[in-house]
Image (cartoon, coloured by chain):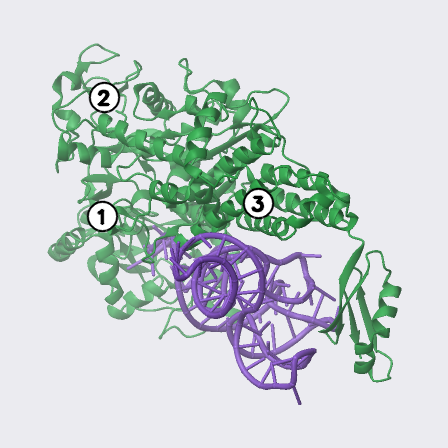
RNA sequence: GCCGGAGUGGCGGAAUGGCAGACGCGACGGACUCAAAAUCCGUUACCUUUCGAGGUGUGAGGGUUCAAGUCCCUCCUCCGGUACCA
């Protein structure tokens, strides 16, 4: 009998499986296909921590089980290799970002292999390789050709620390997603994708997805569809004639209560409407607010909103009243029309502003027909319209329809749906990304470069500057080119695409990673996609996951795909918290690596602990003692099976044989259902229970030798996906297969349903809901029999004290409850 | 504020409306050992106990039910997201 030596097993089996092609994508036409995908990792210099294992180990377990229960499995891995950290490292050291990336990807791969995450490495892809990014560029042009890519010099978010522009998704809350620093607004010409055009479909098609509810909710909030109306107020200016001022409102029912209008400081017509008298003050205000970040504005206005009267008055088209026009930075430039009608009686923000600047408050909504009074606070609820001309008496709900129609009929407004989501800012003034395949020609404008790939040239330095120029701009022989349309001198676009462009289609590439005629082979894509199971952290709810859905829909519209949603089912693993109760990060110095754990406890114990530590989605604190626990489990398995490699038949014990068959069937059923249902923790617990049972009954092995041996075999088989090394070793040691075979290609065992049927069951006897006794009865005892037995029990008799029970509830197989 | 989720032993966590605390960690006791580690066996929600058992208990308070961790209502706390979106 040998001692458990995980190092030896790992060294022995890894190469054998590799040679056998265990993880190669299946292509048996008789089998169903299963595509399991992990989020596209960015290979960072820090390498993988045990936190990442919570992603890669469960998907590996699922895939192993899927192969065993008869699926062709596609489980690929690749690298989201373009991006800032490699570039920053390159800036610091001068090493080419491609070299930095190569080193990091190799390390990731090595680590994944340490804990035997089984990927089909023949399908490995790298988004920074020209063979890949030529297709990213191809999709840029697809969007361009379909009118979904455009250039604009709007204000956008800019992170001064990262020196990079950010999309709205990347700067949610005014915070840079990467460095958590505050972002500022900057006006630079940039490329955008028209994701807003797909807002309705992105919202509506969420409903059918098997995704976590919170992710769907985040996307719904982010898209933020609201139904309202646009109404044109009009302003007679001193020197610019009549200016039309459209405002967007979801509460047109309150329009008779509009007592002023407010324009965002960035509103394009602000200068034209401002009177000579107010010009200086308004200009000062604009300057002051543009100096603030959005976050600073928000913080400042929590102490009190600020604003300036423009001197102008706007006419309310419903009642002809003239109301003062103000500018204030509580009105956002990027939403609606950047102008609002302010109804202080029925909007908290307008109320606060009106109070501060002593503007009138007119109450026009009476919830339940009763005016609430609006001096102290705004009445936000719907109600019956009062003081509202011909609309008085209508409900808020009705009037919203009627008044929008009225506005439309009279040509001063219309019903309007608005969205919170903004177009996707995709260009970056960075070196390490996919070049945008556009040539700027003075005559022809922005012309697509169809000769792909536009290869990233080697440059002297990678440093971006504050001017918003990409390092590529310095590479003159690359920048200067000729226009593909007219042949005259032209310049290449020097920005590259944000990394999220690369990850918006990678899941398609895995179906045919070496295909060179198109981004993907349609037949292969139809065979494997949509992705059956997509697993990663929750942090990409409104970034990657929304972009990838958008691109998929565009490709569908272009006739390239026959599905509109890329990921049928999505799961988010929980975060792993370090021993210091903080997120693991290199900067905090609290990272625990799989490397050190594999050295200490072996891959099998690590794998088991990762899936056993708690529910898959839950945030859990790392515990090395916990890992020591699963290490003890594999050691106990090793020792017990070493002792019982060759069980000889002894005197048959029917009772024990049945018990063993029952426990085995129960275990197989539980493990099967738990792996399928992502309840790995309870599945492992069931296997621990079974091992405990075998261990406690090891002395009886000979009395049920056939079943015992089957139990050993099936137990190893259901444990194999979680603990591949020890199970294959023991499987061979116990002679369940020869040298040419491996446990990992065995059929997943089925449990025997009849073995789950018990002869006798334990019944709980309750009196008024409290447990007073337990009895063991034949499993098929009828209600009447159970009642009779229960009532005859001495304990029950003494509780009843001679009187007849009022009521007896009998649940066969479970309990009898006697109400005295 | 709004949206989503969660509150169960010392800890991570189990429980189709039907025996709360599976499994694991930790702790305690014992065996083995010169000793320690490892391993094995046992105990481990709380209170009371005549050691038979009795009572209490799943964030708080109500309710439905023969029966509630689980269903309903009100509230509290925590986590995640979002935040002047008119």
Measuring from the top left, give residue A339's x and y in whole percent: 30, 51
Residue A603 shows in this picture: yes
Measure the alpha-carbon separation of dots 3 and 2: 59 Å
Dot 3, how many residues are within 10 Å of its Cα: few (below 14), some (14-19), or many (20+)?
some
Kindly identify the residue that appears in the image at 15 percent across and 25 percent down: A473
Measure the alpha-carbon separation of dots 1 and 2: 28 Å
Subunit that carries the residue with mark 3 = A
Dot 2, how many residues are within 10 Å of its Cα: few (below 14), some (14-19), or many (20+)?
some
Question: In this view of the protein, which residue sits in the foreground, B79 or A584?
Answer: A584
Subunit that carries the residue with mark 2 = A
Looking at marks 1 and 2 on the same chain, the residue that comes earlier in the sequence is marked by 1
Residue A113, picture quadrant: top left
**Residue A640: mark in rendering:** 3
Q: Quadrant of the C terminus of chain A?
A: bottom right
The answer as to whether the residues below labels 3 and 2 share one chain is yes
Kindly identify the residue that appears in the image at 48 percent across and 45 percent down: A608
Marks 3/1 in contact by CB < 8 Å: the verdict is no
Looking at the rendered image, the disc whose residue lies closer to the viewer, 1 or 2, is: 2
Q: Secondary structure at mark 1?
A: loop
Measuring from the top left, give residue A43's x and y in whole percent: 31, 34
**Residue A183: mark in rendering:** 1
Mark 2 lies on residue: A456
Subunit that carries the residue with mark 1 = A
Q: Secondary structure at mark 3?
A: helix
Left or right of residue A342, residue A272 in this image: left
């Amino acid at each position: 009998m040998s001692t458990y030596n995980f190092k030896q097993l790992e060294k022995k089996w890894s190469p054998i499986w590799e040679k056998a092609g265990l993880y190669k994508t299946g292509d048996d036409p008789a089998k169903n296909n299963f595509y399991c995908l992990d989020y596209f990792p960015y290979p960072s210099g820090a390498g993988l921590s045990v936190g990442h294992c919570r992603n890669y180990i469960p998907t590996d377990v699922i895939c192993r089980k899927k192969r065993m229960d008869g699926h062709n499995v596609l489980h690929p891995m690749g690298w989201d290799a373009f991006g800032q950290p490699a570039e920053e490292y390159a800036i610091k050291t001068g090493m080419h970002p491609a070299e930095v990336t190569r080193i990091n990807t190799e390390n990731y791969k090595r680590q994944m292999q340490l804990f035997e995450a089984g990927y089909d490495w023949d399908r490995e892809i790298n988004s920074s390789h020209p063979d890949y990014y030529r297709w990213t560029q191809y999709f840029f042009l697809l969007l361009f050709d379909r009118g979904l890519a455009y250039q604009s010099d709007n204000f956008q978010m800019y992170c001064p620390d990262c020196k990079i522009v950010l999309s709205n998704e990347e700067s949610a809350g005014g915070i840079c997603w990467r460095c958590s620093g505050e972002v500022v607004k900057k006006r630079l010409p940039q490329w955008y994708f028209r994701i807003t055009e797909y807002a309705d479909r992105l919202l509506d098609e969420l409903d059918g997805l098997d995704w976590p509810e919170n992710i769907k909710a985040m996307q719904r909030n982010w898209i933020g569809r609201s139904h309202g109306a646009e109404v044109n107020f009009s302003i007679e200016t001193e020197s610019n004639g009549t200016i039309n001022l459209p405002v967007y409102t979801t509460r047109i029912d309150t329009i008779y209560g509009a007592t002023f209008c407010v324009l965002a400081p960035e509103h394009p017509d602000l200068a034209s409407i401002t009177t000579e008298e107010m010009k200086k003050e308004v200009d000062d205000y604009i300057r002051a607010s543009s100096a603030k970040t959005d976050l600073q504005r928000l913080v400042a206005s929590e102490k009190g909103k600020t604003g300036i009267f423009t001197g102008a008055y706007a006419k309310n088209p419903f009642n002809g009243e003239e109301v003062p026009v103000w500018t204030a930075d509580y009105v956002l430039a990027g939403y609606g029309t950047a102008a609002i009608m302010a109804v202080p009686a029925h909007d908290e923000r307008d109320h606060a502003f009106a109070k501060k600047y002593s503007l009138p408050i007119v109450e026009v909504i009476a919830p339940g027909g009763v005016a609430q009074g609006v001096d102290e606070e705004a009445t936000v609820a719907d109600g019956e319209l009062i003081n509202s001309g011909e609309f008085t008496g209508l409900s808020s709900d009705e009037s919203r329809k009627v008044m929008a129609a009225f506005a439309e009929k009279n040509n001063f407004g219309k019903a309007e749906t608005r969205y919170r989501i903004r177009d996707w800012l995709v260009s970056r003034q960075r070196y390490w990304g996919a070049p945008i395949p556009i040539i700027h020609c003075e005559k022809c404008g922005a012309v697509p470069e169809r000769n792909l790939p536009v290869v990233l040239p080697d440059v002297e330095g990678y440093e971006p500057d504050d001017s918003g120029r990409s390092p590529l701009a310095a590479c003159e022989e690359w920048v200067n080119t000729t226009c593909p349309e007219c042949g005259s001198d032209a310049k290449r676009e020097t920005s590259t695409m944000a990394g999220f462009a690369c990850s918006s289609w990678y899941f398609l590439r895995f179906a045919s990673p070496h295909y060179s005629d198109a981004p993907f082979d349609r037949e292969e894509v139809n065979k494997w996609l949509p992705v059956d199971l997509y697993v990663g952290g929750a942090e990409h709810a409104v970034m990657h996951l929304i972009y990838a859905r958008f691109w998929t829909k565009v490709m569908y519209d272009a006739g390239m795909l026959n599905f509109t949603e890329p990921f049928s089912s999505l799961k988010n693993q929980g975060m792993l918290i370090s021993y210091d109760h903080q997120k693991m990060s290199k900067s905090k110095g609290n990272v625990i690596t799989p490397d050190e754990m594999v050295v200490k406890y072996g891959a099998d114990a690590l794998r088991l602990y990762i899936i056993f530590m708690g529910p898959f989605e839950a945030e859990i604190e790392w515990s090395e003692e916990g890992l020591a626990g699963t290490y003890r489990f594999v050691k106990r398995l090793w020792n017990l099976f070493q002792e019982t490699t060759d069980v000889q038949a002894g005197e048959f014990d029917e009772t024990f044989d049945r018990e063993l068959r029952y426990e085995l069937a129960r275990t197989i059923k539980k493990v099967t259902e738990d792996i399928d249902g992502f309840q790995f923790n309870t599945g492992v617990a069931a296997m621990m229970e079974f091992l405990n049972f075998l261990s406690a009954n090891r002395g009886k092995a000979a009395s049920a030798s056939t079943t015992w041996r089957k139990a050993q075999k099936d137990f190893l088989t259901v444990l194999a996906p979680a603990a591949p090394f020890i199970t294959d070793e023991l499987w061979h040691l116990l002679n369940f297969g020869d040298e040419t075979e491996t446990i990992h290609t065995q059929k997943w065992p089925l449990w025997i349903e009849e073995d789950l049927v018990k002869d006798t069951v334990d019944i709980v006897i309750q009196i008024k809901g409290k447990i007073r006794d337990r009895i063991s009865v034949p499993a098929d005892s009828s209600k009447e029999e159970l009642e009779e037995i229960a009532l005859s029990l001495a304990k029950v008799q003494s509780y009843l004290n001679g009187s007849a029970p009022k009521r007896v509830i009998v649940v066969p197989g479970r309990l009898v409850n006697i109400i005295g």
